[in-house]
Amino acid sequence: MILEIVSPEATLFKGEVTSVAVPGVNGEFQMLNNHAPIVSLLTKGNVKINAQNISIEKEFVSKFNKINEQTFWLPIHSGTIEMKDNKVIVLAD
């Protein structure tokens, strides 16, 4: 599935991922390929990205925490997420 993370300043990440977990208002939840369509509000926490090959632009690498070669976390304060047709869009503050 495709993940796109957009902040007010720029698109922080766009690429193919195997899963993404987000801090929803009712708790953390994870989305995998072919997840049902969803729109949700996000709270303070980490967007957890898992992918075979993660490529983050050099100017945004400092915003992410590298857990291992296939896992990165992005701390956010709030936001919105939409999942539809194997594309996840995170609008993050």
Image (cartoon, helix red, strand yellow):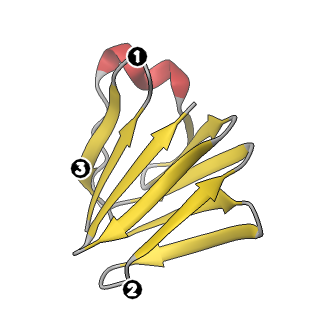
Q: Which type of secondary structure does the marked residue at label 1 adopt?
A: loop
Q: Which type of secondary structure does the marked residue at label 2 adopt?
A: loop
- Which of disc 3 and disc 2 is earlier in sequence? 3
Mark 2 lies on residue: 36
Instruction: Classify 10 Å Cα crowding around label 3: few (below 14), some (14-19), many (20 and above).
Output: some
**In this view of the protein, which residue sits in the foreground, 73 or 6?**
6
Q: Position of residue 49 (x, y in %)?
A: 47, 55
Q: How many marks?
A: 3
Q: Quadrant of the N terminus?
A: bottom left
Q: Which type of secondary structure does the marked residue at label 3 adopt?
A: strand
**In this view of the protein, which residue sits in the foreground, 75 or 85?**
85
**Answer yes or no: do the residues labelled 2 and 3 have beta carbons within 8 Å?**
no
Label 1 and label 2: CA atoms lie apart by: 29 Å
Q: Amino acid at mark 1?
A: Glu
Can residue 67 be seen by looking at this rendering?
no
Label 3 and label 1: CA atoms lie apart by: 18 Å
Residue appearing at x 41%, y 78% in the figure: 32
Q: Position of residue 66 (x, y in %)?
A: 54, 39
Mark 3 lies on residue: 15
Residue appearing at x 43%, y 24% in the figure: 61
Residue appearing at x 44%, y 22% in the figure: 8
Label 2 and label 3: CA atoms lie apart by: 20 Å
- Which of disc 2 and disc 1 is earlier in sequence? 1
- Which of disc 1 and disc 3 is earlier in sequence? 1
Q: Amino acid at mark 2?
A: Ala
5 relative to 58, above or below? below
Q: Quadrant of the C terminus?
A: top right
**Answer yes or no: do the residues labelled 1 and 2 have beta carbons within 8 Å?**
no
Can residue 84 be seen by looking at this rendering?
yes
Q: Position of residue 45 (x, y in %)?
A: 72, 46
Mark 1 lies on residue: 9
Q: Amino acid at mark 3?
A: Gly
